[in-house]
Amino acid sequence: MCHRILYALKEHNPTDLLTGTIEADETYIGGRRRGRGRAYKGNKTPVVSLIERGGRVRSQVVDSVTGKEITKVLRLHVAKDAILNTDESPVYAKIGQEFAAHEAVNHHREEYARINNSGRLVTTNTAEGFFGNCKRSIDGTHHHISRKHTGLYFAELDYKYNTRKDSDGARTNAAIPKIEGKRLMLRRPRSSEK
């Protein structure tokens, strides 16, 4: 039942693009592997989140964090007139040129926020905070989630973030109509023909 609810909350084909200042970042969801350092990503699921400053979030599970994957996600969800804020990762360098502006903070030099020459705040702190809350929610509620269903859990987390200013009742009332026309089938029904 929980998976059906999560499936209903997911935006399957968003028709509008994120605009304004967008913070893009990626994280890895999964446990630690014994004998490996914290940076080991072999058993983790990569998730990319795009957050409108003061607005909505959209998260997507990707196969790997590469320029090609990031390009697909950004082109699908972000308007060309948006201002893109990222960290120094090279996967954003080429696609960043397609937007009105692309600014990056350098975490390796312990730079987390700065004001640029035009007076705009350059940071990915909103995305980092979102990921921190997501990981605490997953660890505290579910303890572990499978790679297969990570997208559904992030659909719930996105929905909670996007309705963060609503009361619980308003959030529930907004979620109920999202059920219409969606059917989650964990297994394909057996064909009547044999």
Image (spheres, rainbow, N blue to C red):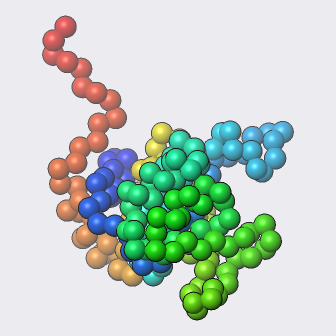
Between 172 and 36, the one lying in front of the other is 36
Residue shown at the point (74%, 69%) measured from the top left: 107
> Residue, x 51% and y 75% (percent of image)?
101
Rendered location of residue 169, percent (x, y): 30, 75
Q: Nearer the viewer, residue 132 or 12?
A: 12
Spot occupied by residue 110 in the image (x, y as percentages of width and height):
78, 74
Relative to 182, 28 lies left or right = right
Quadrant of res 114: bottom right
Q: In the image, is 87 to the left or to the right of 48?
A: right
Figure quadrant of the C terminus: top left
Left or right of 189 in this view: 80: right
Residue at the extreme top of the image, as rendered: 194
Location of residue 130 in the rendering, given as x and y in whole percent from the top left corner: 55, 69
Q: Quadrant of residue 111?
A: bottom right
Q: Nearer the viewer, residue 27 or 1?
A: 27
- Residue drawn at 30 percent across, 53 percent down: 12
- Return the x and y of residue 17 as percentages of the image width and height: 34, 67
Going 67% across and 73% down the picture, which residue do you hit? 105
> Is residue 93 visible to us here?
yes
